[in-house]
Amino acid sequence: MERSLSDIRFYDATRVAALLDYPGCIAAMRQAMIALSSPEHIQPLRQIVRVGPGALFGMMPGALTARSTFGAKLVSVFDDHERPGRSRHQGVIVAYDQATGAVACIADAEAVTRIRTACATAAATDALARADARVLGVFGTGTQAEAHLRAVSLVRPFNEILLWGRSIDAARGLAARLSEELGLEIEAVVDGREAASRADVICTVSGATEPILLGDWVQSGAHINLVGSSYLGPVEVDTPLVAAVRYIADYRPSVLVQASELAVALDAGAIKEDHVVGEIGEVFAGRLAGREKPDQITLYKSLGHAVQDLAAASYLHERALIGERLI
């Protein structure tokens, strides 16, 4: 019996938020990244088309045999005029059934991207940060800052959480709201240098176009998650910091052509391509050492990949089907 388009499951932002729990998504991201780093299957790079001032259209295809799915994310990234200096990711993730070739589900891309990005960071932090890391610093005050505070706080027992933003009022507002919601003490910090110098784990999740985190601010043994810049142009950290770290990519082929901070450091002659020592999936699989010594600064560069979207969509779709069977 043929399926009609009306039979295809669609998960809007509300359903995504209900089904894509953070602990489960962290586990799904770990599995997806191991699959992405498998030497047997090379994944395509995403394509980004500039369609106007402050307006991009991205196409991210991929296949995830580990969850028997393939598909793509189609997403626009436009300036958000209701929130100056920030952008919105609007679109869909289409996940296919690998066995039949039929569309398994469609999910709201913005909602999935928000959660899966933070959960991928959390998984990387768990693998790369020192076991005794107790101070988390987040640079940014948008949706990714909130998602990262929710996700990364699950992988270490932080006793201090510092939040810095270009708007201290926005930082204070987010810190107050999430302190109450999560039962954590989150402190809004005026000075980025202070936040960085105190933090064992740092997440940069801003829309900054120029560095907001400098190398001489970061303490030995810190771990950095570099997330905010996802295409050539905007940079969140300076070249001395990039040169000082053990640099681990989400997907090395993507990072070598689309990671802005890396491109700036390469152009300056501060590093060579072999500065990217490998991929986080290799670390998860035990094929690559993550942190080599306690005083080393490690860095995880997140650009995002379709396998993360497919893993998240497949996971939430599976949860929905299980829930229906239990009713």
Image: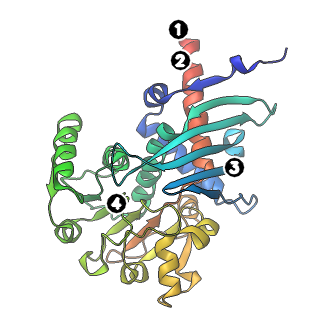
Q: Counting other residues with Cα less than 10 Å from the Cα at mark 2, is it few (<14), some (14-19), or many (20 or more)?
A: few
Q: Nearer the viewer, mark 4 or mark 1?
A: 4
The mark that comes first in sequence, 4 or 1, is 4
- Seen at 18% across and 44% down, the residue is 173
Identify the residue at the far front of this view.
Answer: 53
Of mark 3 and mark 4, the one earlier in the sequence is: 3
Say which amino acid is labelled 1: Ile
Residue 103: quarter of image:
top right
Per the image, label 4 sits on a secondary structure element best described as: strand
Q: Is residue 171 in sight in this rendering? A: yes
- Specify the quadrant that holds the N terminus: top right
Which residue, given by chain and number where applicable, does mark 1 sit on? Answer: 327
| C-alpha span from label 2 to label 1 | 7 Å
Q: CA distance from mark 4 to mark 1?
A: 40 Å
Query: Is disc 3 surrounded by few (<14), some (14 to 19) or many (20+) residues within 10 Å?
Result: many
The amino acid type found where label 4 is placed reads Cys
Q: In the drawing, what numbered circle is on residue 61?
A: 3
Q: Which residue is at 60% across, 68% downward?
A: 252
Identify which amino acid the numbered label 2 is placed on.
Gly
The kind of secondary structure element at disc 3 is strand
Mark 2–mark 3 Cα distance, whole angstroms, equals: 29 Å
